[in-house]
Amino acid sequence: MISESLKKYFIATVSSLAIFALLLLYLFFRRGYIDLYIVNKVFAGSSLIVLALVLLIGSLGRFYNFFDPWLVYRKHLGIISFILALFHGIVSLFFLPGRFTLSYFLTNYVTFILGLLGLILLGYLFFISFKVFTSKMDPKKWWAYQVWGGRVAGLLVFFHLVLMKYPGWIRWYQNGGNDELVRPFMPPASIIAAAFGFFVILVRLFESMNQKLVKSITPILFMGLIIFVGLSFYIGKSKTPVALPIKWETCIHLYGSRVLNNSTKCASIDGRVVTKLEN
């Protein structure tokens, strides 16, 4: 018979995989292909969303009875968030040398350090979740480590994402998507993940200031999140409603592209064709 703990891990895993699959599907529709670089993005985004859910469930469970059953899954979701973040770190460091070079990490050392610290802290919380550690620790201290460790790790991961991605976000809002995208009007998935993370941060901030206020303001904040995402799609549609003509350099480096007719033409995975002489 399956133990209660395994059931909790199963439900938390299925929930996290659903978030992973939705994010992967979104990026597939936006870019038109899936490769390891895309999957690595999903590891990062889903890790942040799952970790944000852990923090959000704690707040919602104190004010809405509907979320009470989910309180018991916070530990299990936190562990899965660490595993996703670990996969993201491993893939970035060892499996995508063309994307993440030594000079890249040195140039972006602040975001790298934030991500590394967040991963280490999540790893620490993961290891002290096992009974071999919990049985030797004071329950109050263990709970304090989990509560504050989760909050700090969430902030580290959030700022790791924001500081790394915000220049690209600004370019997207100003100019729209580039020629690499099949559906350039779709906002970057990192914007959506960061917006959800920011929503959770606001909920936690309001809760720390006024616990009565947060119950009434949380639905307003959630509506603000929905409106922000909707406006982002509207801006994307106004900037680049359809795929742009693909450039030669973009096509030959794009996953799934094929060079045709003695290297004079390149066809992208979504069917756009470019002739070398035109560029």
Image (cartoon, helix red, strand yellow):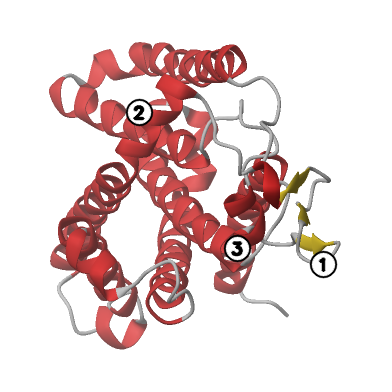
Residue 11 visible to the viewer = no
Q: How dense is the environment of label 2, judged by Cα within 10 Å: few (below 14), some, or many (20 and up)? A: few
Q: Secondary structure at mark 2?
A: helix
Which residue is nearer to you in this view: 236 or 253?
Answer: 253
Left-right relation of 3 to 71: right
| 254 vs 275: above or below | below
Q: How dense is the environment of label 3, judged by Cα within 10 Å: few (below 14), some, or many (20 and up)? A: some
Tell me where residue 132 sits by quadrant. bottom left
Q: Which mark is residue 170?
A: 2
Q: Amino acid at mark 3?
A: Thr
Q: Amino acid at mark 2?
A: Ile
Which residue is nearer to you in this view: 38 or 270?
Answer: 270
Expressed as whole percent of the image width and height from the top left, the position of residue 148 reads: 18, 53
Q: Earlier in the sequence, mark 3 or mark 2?
A: 3
Expressed as whole percent of the image width and height from the top left, the position of residue 37 reads: 54, 63
Q: Amino acid at mark 1?
A: Asn
Query: How far apart are labels 3 and 1 at the CA level?
Result: 48 Å
